[in-house]
Image: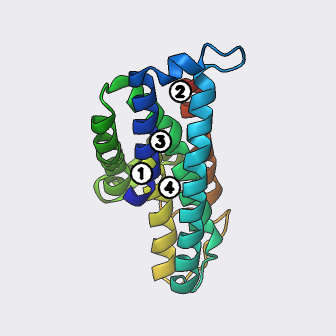
């Protein structure tokens, strides 16, 4: 999961470097170029790297998963990588130096991954619900942790996970995690464009 934060850290630090050096202001003097065009172009560059990483993950899961389709976790990781790009741009707007941005993105990804990692172990069975998992899934790292844990729990039991197969206790179907990862991408992308 932390590997998918590398493209986001690079695009955010490069965007911040452009912003600090004034190159972005120079480009903005052209009639059709605005700051959000640069954000979108950097997110497209990050998407290409994320797509290549997701393809590698697909090959890995094709070899290792014996019951579940390898597309399921690969699509989840791809959407996770996509949602990190605008989130990294937002962090890059808050942190002023490009070097600090490159270091802070993986750190932030790890920190926001903790609720998803620890949720299944710390929450009592009666507290685990689809709505609480959707709130936790507003953090992309937590969403992918919940989704991968859902897949791997059933895989260890020898059960095939499909798009509609519910989680053990919360009864959250697989497509809800995917939907939340896509929602995170749209939500953070909208915020990044508004803030730029």
Residue placed under numbered mark 4 in the picture: 170
Q: Verify CB contact (< 8 Å) between mark 4 and mark 1.
A: no
Which of labels 2 and 4 is toward the front? 2
Q: Nearer the viewer, residue 156 or 125?
A: 156
Residue 161 x, y percent position in the rendering: 61, 72
Residue 132 x, y percent position in the rendering: 46, 42
Give the SS element for disc 2.
helix
Taking 46 as reference, is 146 above or below it? below
Q: Which is nearer the N-term, disc 1 or disc 3?
A: 1
Q: Residues within 10 Å of mark 4 (few under 14, many from 20)?
A: some
Taking 118 as reference, is 155 above or below it? below
Which of labels 3 and 2 is toward the front? 3
Q: Which is nearer the N-term, disc 4 or disc 3?
A: 3
Disc assigned to residue 11: 3
Residue placed under numbered mark 1 in the picture: 5
Q: Which is nearer the N-term, disc 2 or disc 1?
A: 1
Give the SS element for disc 1.
helix
Distance CA(mark 1)–CA(mark 3): 10 Å
Taking 154 as reference, is 51 above or below it? above
Q: Going by the image, does 72 lie left or right of 141?
A: right
Give the SS element for disc 3.
helix
Residue placed under numbered mark 2 in the picture: 192
Residue 24 x, y percent position in the rendering: 52, 22
């Amino acid at each position: 999961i932390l590997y998918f934060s590398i493209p986001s850290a690079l695009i955010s630090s490069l965007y911040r470097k452009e912003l600090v050096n004034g190159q972005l202001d120079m480009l903005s003097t052209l009639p059709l170029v605005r700051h959000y065009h640069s954000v979108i172009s950097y997110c497209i560059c990050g998407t290409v790297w994320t797509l290549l990483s997701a393809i590698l993950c697909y090959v890995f899961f094709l070899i290792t998963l014996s019951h579940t389709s390898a597309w399921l976790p690969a699509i989840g990781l791809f959407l996770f990588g996509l949602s990190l790009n605008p989130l990294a741009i937002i962090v890059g707007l808050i942190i002023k130096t490009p070097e600090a941005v490159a270091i802070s993105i993986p750190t932030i990804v790890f920190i926001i991954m903790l609720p998803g990692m620890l949720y299944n172990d710390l929450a009592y069975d009666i507290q685990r619900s689809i709505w609480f998992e959707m709130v936790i899934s507003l953090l992309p790292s937590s969403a992918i942790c919940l989704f991968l844990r859902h897949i791997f729990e059933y895989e260890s039991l020898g059960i095939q996970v499909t798009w509609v197969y519910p989680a053990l206790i919360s009864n959250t179907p697989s497509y809800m995690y995917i939907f939340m990862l896509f929602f995170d991408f749209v939500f953070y992308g909208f915020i990044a464009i508004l803030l730029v």
